[in-house]
Image (cartoon, rainbow, N blue to C red):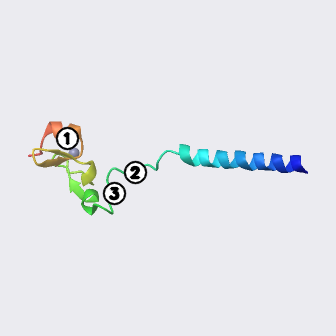
Amino acid sequence: MGLIRLLLLIGLGWLLFKVVRFYLSRPPAATTPVDPAANPDASRLVACAHCGTRIPLNRAVLADSRIYCGLECRRLGPAD
Ligand SMILES: [Zn+2]
């Protein structure tokens, strides 16, 4: 009976070790760069100065106090 109890204790210890190691080795939860709830302005849609595409402000490219949807539109400059 003593041997069975010992094996059970070893098994429980091993299980506990595995569970603790699993939780410690888990990478931290991925965080969003901008939380829309914390900063509602970041998800506001803005129009590209070149093509007029509406994109969220947190994905916009800002240059010369103008807003662009991407680097290509920024390179082409504002539409006339
Ligand atoms: Zn654009």
Q: Which residue is mark 3?
A: 35
Amino acid residing under circle 1: Cys
- Density class for disc 2 (Cα within 10 Å; few <14, some 14-19, many ≥20) is few
Residue nearest the viewer, comparing 12 with 65: 12
Residue mark closest to the camera, 1 vs 2? 2
Q: Which residue is mark 1?
A: 73
Residue mark closest to the camera, 3 vs 1? 3
Q: Which residue is mark 2?
A: 31
Residue nearest the viewer, comparing 9 with 33: 9
In the rendered image, residue 37, in percent from the top left (x then y), is placed at: 33, 63
**Looking at the image, in which quadrant does ligand 1 appear?**
top left
In the rendered image, residue 29, in percent from the top left (x then y), is placed at: 46, 50
Amino acid residing under circle 2: Thr
Splitting the image into 4 quarters, where does residue 47 fall? Answer: bottom left
Q: Are marks 1 and 2 in contact (CB under 8 Å)?
A: no
Apparent side of residue 77 relative to residue 5 in the rendered image (left or right): left
